Every structure is written in C-alpha cells, then in structure tokens.
Image (cartoon, helix red, strand yellow):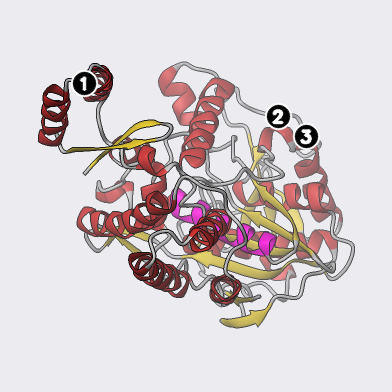
Amino acid sequence: MHIYDSVKKTKLLFEPIHSNKASIYVCGPTVYDDAHLGHARSALAFDLLSRTLNILGYEVTLGKNFTDIDDKIIKKVKETGKSLEEITSFYIERYLAEMEALGVQRANIEPKATQSLEAIKTMIQTLIDKDFAYVISTGDVYFDTSKDSNYGEISGRVAEDDVSQNRVQHTSEKRNPKDFALWKACKNNEDICFDATFSKGRPGWHIECSAMIDKYFKGDGEYTIDIHAGGADLLFPHHENEAAQSRCATGHELAKYWMHNGFVQIDGEKMSKSLGNSFFLKDALKLYDGEVLRYYLNSVHYRNDFNFSEEELQLSKKRLDKLYRLKKRVSPGKASIANKNFKQKLLDAMSDDLNISMALSHIDEMITTTNDALDENPKNKALKKETLANIELIDILLGFGGKEPFSYFQIGVDETLKEKINNLIEERIKAKKDKNFERSDAIREELASFGISIMDTSTGTLWEKI
C-alpha cells in the first residue's frame, strides 16, 4: 500500500507503527449545522482508505471526532434557546444517518469534546508545566509557537496573522501573533463554561483532537498514530497546531503520515456558505440515492478538487447502472469466488494511493467482457457465480453494488406510483391465473407507459423503472 503524504509531498510505502495494524484519525464535523458535500467527500475518501487497508489484511482502528464545543454552537444555543446537548445530539444523529445512507462505515472510536474534557485539561496543564503554553490575565491559555522549533513543518507555511489561526480575538498579551488559543476563558454572560485550574472556560478548537488522539490511541514510540486525515483546508492551521501541541506535550510526533482530501466546488467555486453555494447533504439525499452519491463523489481521486455538477452526476449514475444491469443478468444465484486477476487489479489500483479511476476502469472492463461472454453463452452458471462474487468484492472494497438489482432500479419512484404498480402487478397475476391473457398483456402495456418494465421469475414478478 502506497499513500501520498501531505507533509513530504510524495507517495510513501505504508509501513505501520505496529505490524498488520493501522490506526487512523479523521477530523470530524463541528456539530452546529447540517453536513454538506464537503463533509461527505472527506468521510467517503477515508472510508475508502479504511476499506482498502481492511481487505489488505490490516486490523484498522478508525477514530473520528465530533467537535461539540465551539463558538458557532454557542451562538446557536443563544439563537434557539435550546441546550448545547440538544443541538449537538440532533446534528450528530443526523450526520451519522446521512453517512450510513452513503455507505460510510462507522468509526471504531467516535469521541466528543465534551466527553474528553479531563484529557484536554491535562494536556493543556502539561504544556503549561513544560513552558510551551502560558496563561494571560483574562484566563485564556495560549500555545507559544516560538518554543517549538519544528512549527511549520506540517504545512510548510506559518502565517503571521491568519484569520483562522484561532477563534478568539487577538490580544496584546500574546507573545507572538501566530500563538493560538488552547483554552478560552469565559467572558461576561457566558454560561457554557467548564472549571479548570487555569480558568473557567472551554477548550480551543485545535487542542481537542490532540487530546482525544492521545487519550484513545496512546502512542508508545516515535508516533501516536499511523495516519491523520482530513480536508485540505485543515492542513493549516488546524493540523499544524495539532502537530505542534502534541509533539511538545507527549515528546513524540502525532502521526507518521498525513493525508488530505481536496475541496468540493460547485460551478467551479470552492463550496462555501459565504458564497451561498453550500449544498447540504440532506438535500442531495432527497434527490439521489445515497449509493449513487457515493459512486459519484468517489469517482474523482480524493486529492483532487471535486466540481459538483448534476449533469456529471447523471452520467456517473449511468455508469453505476451498468453494474446493476449485469448483476440483474446474473441474479438470482449464489456467488462463488471472485476472479483472481480481477481482484488483484482492483487491489493494485486501490493500493496506489486509492487510485479510484483505475479501479473503476477495471470494473467497466469486467462488465463489458462478462456481458460479451454471456451473450455467447447465456447459461454459463460458473461465470454467473463468479460475477456475483466480483460484485460482492466491489461492494466490500468500494461500497457500491450491494443492493438487490430490481430494488436499485426502483429508486426514485414515488410511493403513490409504487402502490399503483404493485396493485397492477397483483391484478395481472390474477388475470394470468384466470387465463385472461388479454388483460394480462394490457396491464403490461399500461406499466410500460409509466416507464416500468416487469419480469416474471420463479420468486414472483419483479419490476424496475426503465
């Protein structure tokens, strides 16, 4: 397995800290609003990574956090009158449901900042004790970037005054403009605060992940975890700051490898609420099946920026349709063993820094050659069983192809029409039983007028939207 390391800016052979094990931490969402396509892209990219490492024989431990203490959350508390827990629980549950719809496998560890406060405070105190952090008169605690000689090595840049460097106002008491907040002391009229020896307040954004990684993974060597991953926008300052505070607090590096996925763009612009083009995932899932979105969002290599286009999505769906038409052709039946060469081609592609384009081209080739072979010999049972096994492999590795094919082709048909279709099919079954073939044929034609094709099988009549 080779992966592209964002720090070294090259592909590296994946050599885990512990043999046959892989520890991955992905930065999760700040849960104050609905997930958007950018969240989905990141989750899907590293779901592919986890799936690939799993099938290659690694025991994967995946962690993904929820930031449930943040200024934006507190603002929403004040605006809505709801409690912090009400708001964050609602958006966490919705996020998990939407990830499930996309076929994203649950992380092994899903820590929340509110559940990790002791670990956060302990790490901050350690940094203070080691003179890597300092408390100012307001009770805020800052990390002293000048004390870390390696600061800047993750991103390759150190901004003197980046607006995203911290989420509090700048103060004249900061020793360096690029120092960032580890702890934010409560201000007047703020009631979402937690007790700590340095002040009553709440953690800064960057410290949360460092403390949670240390708490749940506990590195015992040169590195804490194998892979730290997230969106490209997190490289600086978030991951730079995480790396610095973890290095200084623990004495070892946070991660051996750093991986970042590209941005999602709509009409060529980076997706951003300030641009008014943020595409919420909940809205996309109302229009498209989760597996169709998964296929489309994963169809571009994870490191590249993704330009979301409904036209391209439809073309992508047609490509997925071909796989399900093949599955329908070889169903029902029992899978045997996946074709050895096909499996090796898929694994080779995904082992090359998740080369999804190559993997999808191998799948297209398999579909074409299998259809050609079945055209020559439609009763080739061995090939049908092998094809079902190939599709099972695709589902395990890439997360699509696992649906029953007729159900897949029913996606997008509204419930009223479904009821009408099922009633007509029942009427047709009765007509055939009564040998009323004229009515049976008339019903088939009526269904065709709705764009519905039917097939009589040993298990009953199946239908799909053409």
Question: Residue 184's x, y, as percent?
Answer: 63, 41
On whether residue 44 falls in the magenta region, the answer is yes
Give the foreground label among 1 and 3.
Answer: 1
In what element is the residue under mark 3?
loop
- In the image shown, does 364 or 305 lie closer to the viewer? 364
Type of secondary structure dominating the magenta stretch: helix
Mark 1 highlights which residue?
435
Ranked by sequence position, the earlier of labels 2 and 1 is: 2
Which residue is denoted by mark 3 in the rendering?
196
Is residue 131 something one can see in this rendering? no
Q: Which of the pair 417/22 is nearer the observer?
A: 417
Check residue 194 in the rendering and tell me which mark sits there, or answer none. Answer: 2
Cβ–Cβ below 8 Å for labels 2 and 3? yes
Q: On the image, which quarter does residue 448 sit in?
A: top left
Q: Is residue 354 left or right of residue 217?
A: left
Give me the C-alpha separation between circle 2 and circle 3: 7 Å
Quick check: 104 above or below 345? above
10 Å neighbourhood of mark 1: few (<14), some, or many (≥20)?
A: few
Q: Residue at x 23, y 16 (%)?
A: 434
Amino acid, disc 1: Lys
User: Residue 387 location, x and y as percent?
Assistant: 50, 60
Q: Which residue range is magenta in the image? A: 40-55
The CA span between labels 2 and 1 is 77 Å
Give the residue displayed 21% in from the left and 21% down from the top.
435
